[in-house]
Image (cartoon, grey):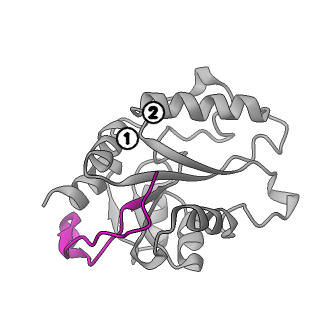
Amino acid sequence: MFANTLFEVHAESLDGAGTVLEGSNRVILLDRDGVLNVDFPDSVKRLDELEVEPQALVGCSALAHAGYGLAVVTNQSAVGRGLMDRPTLDAVNAELNHRLGGVIDHWYVCDHAPEAGCRCRKPDTLLLEQAHAELGFTPADTWFVVDAGRDIEAARRFGCRPALVRTGKGAATATEYPDVPCWDDLAAFAHALTDR
């Protein structure tokens, strides 16, 4: 769905902290838990546990309306730990996308347990490599909206721009990564990027 042609966004100030967005192509990468849905200690394991972050729908809608393609890049180790099966995970992701207006076009999911030693579990970068191969974005011009340190590290290793939100683990993570631009939630990030 995403074109390989990249469209530049003019530099502008973001987030009252004076952060400057110099340029971005038309793909936004998103973590799932804590960014799109409410995070739980053992993740969302059933459909009845799914709760959308309050401003996630507004944020996704604003980004999609502005012409950004949305791709989720997420660790979901509950499958590998035997807490849920892959069809249930896929159903949860489909329902989340439905509640967000159906605007998420691509999902890149690591469902392995942490001890599996895979390359797709963030902070490793295989999921980002797969997204890049399929979507053709320029990493240095691509924002990855996250709430946890491992996601920031994955973004940095692959050369993407981490954007931190204070939902989920984000408020605590912001104290560990004071150099990463930070917004209250996905809607705040989206409006800063699209309100020109």
Pick the residue in front: 18 or 97.
Answer: 97
Disc 2 on helix, strand or loop?
Answer: loop
**Residue farthest toward the top in the current orientation of the protein:** 48
Mark 1 Cα shell of 10 Å, populated few (<14), some (14-19), many (≥20): many
Stretch of the chain drawn in magenta: 1-27
Whether residue 100 is situated above or below residue 181 in the rendered picture: above
The quadrant in which the C terminus is found is bottom left
Question: Residue sitting at 80 percent across and 57 percent down?
Answer: 114
- The label number, if any, that marks residue 46 in the structure image: none
Whether residue 136 is situated above or below residue 1 in the rendered picture: below
At which x and y percent is residue 37? Answer: 49, 38
Pick the residue in front: 150 or 86.
Answer: 86
**In the rendered structure, which amino acid carries the disc numbered 1?**
Ala
Disc 2: which residue: 52
Whether residue 76 is situated above or below residue 193 in the rendered picture: above
Q: Quadrant of residue 85?
A: top right
Q: Quadrant of residue 142?
A: bottom left
Residues at circles 2 and 1 in contact by the CB criterion of under 8 Å? yes
Disc 1: which residue: 56
Pick the residue in front: 177 or 35.
Answer: 35
How far separated are the C-alphas under marks 2 and 1?
7 Å
